[in-house]
Amino acid sequence: VQVAESGGGLVQAGGSLRLSCTASGLKFADRTMGWFRQAQGKDRESVACISWGGTQTHYRDSVKGRFTISRDNAKNTVYLQMNNLKPEDTAMYYCAPGIHWDKCTGVWVPENEGDKFKDWGQGTQVTVST
């Protein structure tokens, strides 16, 4: 699986950014897509998930009402629109193409290395200043 994230940058609190992730090497239209983030010194955490058809979405509580995940299956691309950004949103953001829905939403946290999601991209840095 090849993954390319883009759209990160430096923005003031209250500002907006739109992240994009293009993935290949998988049946994009048939798979759940997710966005995760990892702040310095912290564990990677799920931010948003979208089902294969786009009819079902899931967000972590801290971003509800501010972030919107969407997808364009014709372009093999998933987006994360981030509005009203806060300093605590500062992190490296990673796309998770084809992740299992339960892994994305946190219902299933694999303990075995073989079950953990591995197809991470390089990430795109989001920095929100005060």
Image (spheres, grey):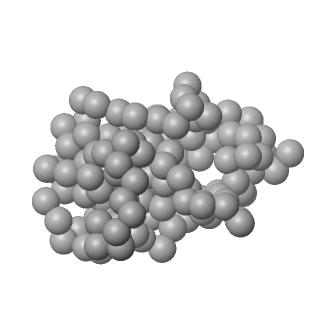
The structure residue drawn at horizontal position 25% and vertical position 57%, both measured from the top left corner, is 98
Furthest toward the top, the residue is: 65
Furthest toward the right, the residue is: 130
What is the x, y in percent for residue 119?
Answer: 33, 70
The structure residue drawn at horizontal position 35% and vertical position 33%, both measured from the top left corner, is 57
Quarter of the image with the C terminus is: top right
Relative placement, left or right, of 11 versus 118 is right
On the image, which quarter does residue 37 sit in?
bottom right
The answer to whether residue 130 is above or below residue 23 is above
The structure residue drawn at horizontal position 37% and vertical position 42%, both measured from the top left corner, is 107
Q: Nearer the viewer, residue 1 or 20?
A: 1
Relative placement, left or right, of 73 versus 97 is left
Q: What number of labels is visible? A: 0
What is the x, y in percent for residue 6?
Answer: 49, 62
Quarter of the image with the N terminus is: bottom left
Is any part of residue 72 visible from this angle? no
What is the x, y in percent for residue 63?
Answer: 58, 35
Q: Nearer the viewer, residue 112 or 70?
A: 112
